[in-house]
Image: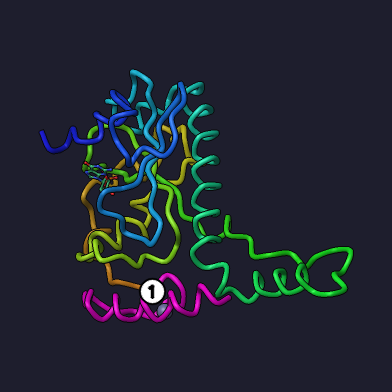
Amino acid sequence: DRRDGLGVYTADPYAYDRVLFNNENAVIIQDMFPKSSVHLLVLPKSKRNVLHPFKAFEDPELLADIKVEVERAKQMVASELRRKYGQFSKSEQARIQARDADDPPNVLPAGRDWMKEIITGIHAVPSMNHLHVHVMSKDMVNDCLTRSAHYNSFQTSFLVPLEEFPLPEDDPVRQIGYGPWHTVDLVCWRCKKNFSNKVTKLKAHLAEEHDQWKRE
Ligand code: 5GP
Ligand code: ZN
């Protein structure tokens, strides 16, 4: 089953170049069809990893362990963003210039906090069976993003942050299903401009926003 495709990474971590990190709790992998310029997945190894995430994360121990691994994945995404875009970012440039000055200041200006440029969460209705947490840059710029649902699945309450777990019994997020999130208007995450259902226009705009964002 195509939906079982993520199972191989926890079963045999050393067989795949996409596996960037491996410990007893989880593997951290590159998403094969990334929807942002940096897009990783945290895959728990727990036996509960075939349960729906709402059920799986009722286990406080699993939840606590995976929060640690998600934090680790965020650090990995942040350093990749610094590597890719640090040279363009004004705050990073100020830091580099101060550091390399003939008479460097005692206290360097802070570089950019790339940890703030990251989205994490779980899809309310995952398409893949094995438990996985998305950890990705905010930009939503990638050739693999071709459909409105790709965008909206990360930009609406369909993406459930790990902090919301364990979900209360009556949490409305439990009822999201394939509900209206799927067809809501496409809204730019950065300037909130509404692109209705025009995904090609949105993508062109996101590319411009990406160029500004990396220069912040
Ligand atoms: P979901 O919608 O289930 O939360 O997201 C599943 C994610 O897994 C998607 O972002 C998709 O691009 C990714 N994906 C699907 N198949 C594979 C695969 O075989 N390998 C990897 N590394 N990622 C995959
Ligand atoms: Zn915008």
Q: Determine whether, in the image, residue 72 is placed left or right of residue 91.
A: left
Q: Residue at x 12, y 38 (%)?
A: 2
The quarter in which the N terminus is drawn is: top left
Percent position (x, y) of residue 136?
Answer: 42, 54
Q: Which residue is mark 1?
A: 188
- Membership of 87 in magenta stretch: no
Percent position (x, y) of residue 146?
Answer: 20, 66
Percent position (x, y) of residue 117?
Answer: 53, 61
Q: Residue at x 58, y 59 (%)?
A: 114
Q: Residue at x 34, y 33 (%)?
A: 53
Q: Which of 97 and 43 lies nearest the eye of the viewer?
A: 97
Q: Residue at x 63, y 76 (%)?
A: 90
The reply to whether the residue tagged 1 has its Cβ within 8 angstroms of ligand 2 is: yes
**Quadrant of ligand 2 in image:** bottom left
Is residue 113 shown above or below 46?
A: below
Coloring basis for residues: rainbow
Q: Residues within 10 Å of mark 1 (few under 14, many from 20)?
A: some
- Membership of 192 in magenta stretch: yes
- As drawn, the residue found furthest toward the front would be 102
Q: Determine whether, in the image, residue 181 is placed left or right of residue 91.
A: left
Percent position (x, y) of residue 104?
Answer: 85, 70
Find residue 3 and report its image quarter: top left
- As drawn, the residue found furthest toward the left would be 1
Is residue 192 shown above or below 35?
A: below
Question: Where are the magenta residues, as a range?
Answer: 188-216
The quarter in which the C terminus is drawn is: bottom right
Mark 1 falls on what kind of element?
A: loop
Amino acid at circle 1: Cys
